[in-house]
Image (tube, rainbow, N blue to C red):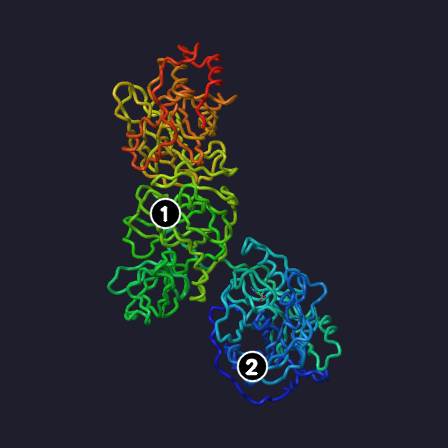
Amino acid sequence: MSQHLLLPLVILVIGPDPGTFQDSAFSPSQEEPEDLDCGRPEPSARIMGGSDAQPGTWPWQVSLHHWGGHVCGGSLIAPSWVLSAAHCFVSNGTLEPASEWSVLLGVHSQDEPQDGAHVREVAAILVPDNYTRVELGSDVALLRLASPARLGPTVRPVCLPRASHRFTHGTSCWATGAGDVLEADPLPRPWVLQEVELRLLGEAACQCLYSRPGPFNLTFQLLPGMLCAGYPEGRKDTCQGDSGGPLVCEEGGRWFQAGITSFGFGCGRRNRPGVFTAVAPHEAWIRTQVMGSVPGPVFPTQPLELQSGPREPMEENCTVALPECGKAPRPGAWPWEAQVMVPGSKPCHGALVSESWVLAPASCFLDRISSDGPPRDLNAWRVLLPSRPRAERVARLVPHENASWDDASDLALLQLRVPVNLSAALRPVCLPYLEHYFLPGSRCRLARWGRGEPASGPSALLEAELLSGWWCHCLYGHQGETVPPQGGGGGGPLLGERREAGRCWNDSRWSLLCREEGTWFLAGIRDFSSGCLRPRAFSPLQTHGPWISHVTRGAYLEDQLVWDWGLEGGETEIQTCPPHTEHGACGLRQKAAQMEHLWPWLAEVHVAGDHVCTGILVAPGWVLAATHCVLRLGSTTVPYIEVYLGRAGANPLPQSHQVSRLVNSIRLPRHLGHGPPLALLELSSRVEPSPSSLPVCLHPGGIPPGASCWVLGWKDPQDRVPMAAAVSILTPRLCGCLYQGILPPGTLCVLYSEGQEDSCEVTSAPPLLCQTEGGSWVLMGMAIRGSRELFAAISPEEAWISQTVGEAHFLPPSGPPYWSPEGSNLCPLGMAGASGPPRAALLLLLLTPLIQG
Ligand code: ARG
């Protein structure tokens, strides 16, 4: 039974059995003289107008034990017969032996047996022949008791509806059981029978709800013989362990069993009312099974006035419930923003998660938490909430049990003394269920969390983009580590990419809010980022959903609303982390079909609105480009330059993946003599690492072992679709021989693989990259003006680049040194003096060892 406000039952009513209660309207003895009365609880045991259940209220309720433990519910329909659900007894297509089961009757609290409570063995279990699986219907079972139940004030049968019986949709009925009180949250001791009021939903109304994708993106087709009860908004429902138990409706002073608890999708979820087996259609089957048993079940005629009348009111056709949590008028105006004021401390930021509960980091209160009772000054604690004229008082502080030693559980719940009335300006944030998977690429925001210093600026501007598990893991993990494939559950930390201009905001602490279909979820807490060099990482909140709902019994957990796997696709393979520098990973590129044209470090450098060159992101705020592209010869003024990242030419990615920045300054190395080939462009603000913009690794010199190399450029400067042409890098000796006398020191030359020569145009100065054995991409050089084969190497400029760009990712040197002293007199015959690579020279080169691995 999932209901957020259930009071434990403590009143025991012991009274004499008044015997069969006669009713003038319809006496069962007139209809079925051999049968008992049904559907009437002990009259004195019910409280008029009340809603709390009491012992004896539901005297037909039984508990079915399998090997001694409660598994399902059932209802007594005759002294020797119990009605329940088939799925309780069928596993893997076979019916479990009756001898393993026992029936507890007259049990109000399973911990403390009351007067009249007793146990019966089961003689037989009967299930319809056509029953296979719950979702396919006919989920009904009959249990014949080994000996009749002892009827009394707390043990009485319920009435069964005839096949012609029609329950009016929209009427309130009651479901009872000792099942879970929330998903995966068992009824606590002393296991007092729970009751919940549920509305009958018409077939059309229910099918309308189930036709909308719900948990796990599923829809469901209801079948004849199924019946729904509950509410579109959820929150009240039956749950695991209630199966087989009755759904009863009162008509003319008697309780008729309308349904048998059968299944649901989760418990109490929005637009997912409980599904019951309708009892009326099974009249004939039940009668056949119990034939000859005296006294048998009672099927009283439906009171006349209820037999006609509207079955499915017109207005009931399709009312779906929208999320009640997570709506914000605009990003940054968070209606759940809570500030906890503890005397003598700075305010602590948290979030309203229900009418009565605020979630905040426990670290705010650790100095006040002691093992012996609540904080002494709890009386003086206050909570400030949006649109509330006065501060709220605090009734209770519940820290997470691991809060003091596990940073990922740095959570506490504060209960308000008086629940607040929700409104557009004051509403809880949505919390994710355990299985929620926030899709990589989700748009998120950072919100204040805990006692961080106030950010100097509008925090609404703190945008973030979620990275996939692999990226997250690798950016914080270690080279060569393997990352298991992403599966359902919310495993590792979440990662947000800050998208706000300029500042790093490292001095503040944040939580991560992610939006799905306009609804905001609290996705992550405890931003544990170190420094500003890597994307922020957050602990996922979904692992704490069960604890939060257990404590609050009313927090707004909401199903995943977005299931479009989009760009990243499912991560199904084990992946390995590429090399790291002290700043994290560089040169990562995800393999996904839709990312084919996306090179996260390839930038479009738009110079003075006039021409476009390639640039390479070497650090979050720096792009490397060929000097001749960005500076015109003889010009002394710095042009207006814009840089675009996350573009994939004619195959454009969603706008959200694109980033543009202005160039603040151009830095050149202090070379004496001729013009330096490489220029560093300082961006107006950082570009945080994400799958669509990530710095490349830089080559420190030497020969990258096992590398395959590529010239990365555009086939045509208009559409700018990135193309990678496979090349081999020639040894300096061969290079020198081919271009004798005309090469500046530190020039790399390449040989294109068959047919790849024309892949890239040359005016944009394409870069030369190699993919190392470990998988990461390293920048080797940038094309020298007008050449397709010659590249200005990065490694000779390492000192200048590292000094200018502190975060540049130079990989540790590996392999033999590249520019080792060589005799220049060793050129193959016929090559010396060639001004370009002639045919004969190429042929020779192919016979000479090339740089490979
Ligand atoms: N099948 C469950 C059981 O065996 C009952 C689930 C009812 N679920 C619901 N959301 N109404 O106890």
Dot 2: element = loop
Give the vertical position of 173 relative to 427 (above or below). below
Q: Amino acid at mark 1?
A: Arg
**Residue that mark 2 sits on:** 56
Q: Mark 2 vs ligand 1: CB under 8 Å? A: no
Check whether the beta carbons of the residues at disc 2 and disc 1 lie within 8 A of each other: no
On residue 250, the disc is none
**Residue that mark 1 sits on:** 536
Residue at image coords 29%, 33%:
802
Q: Amino acid at mark 2?
A: Gly
Q: Position of residue 399 (x, y in %)?
A: 36, 64
Q: Earlier in the sequence, mark 2 or mark 1?
A: 2
Q: Position of residue 248 (x, y in %)?
A: 60, 73
Q: Position of residue 736 (x, y in %)?
A: 38, 16
User: Left or right: where does residue 59 sit relative to residue 512?
Assistant: right
Dot 1: element = strand
Give the vertical position of 518 relative to 606 (above or below). below
User: Left or right: where does residue 391 sit relative to residue 300?
Assistant: left
Residue at image coords 34%, 34%:
810
- Who is closer to the viewer here, 290 or 444? 290
Quadrant location of residue 763?
top left
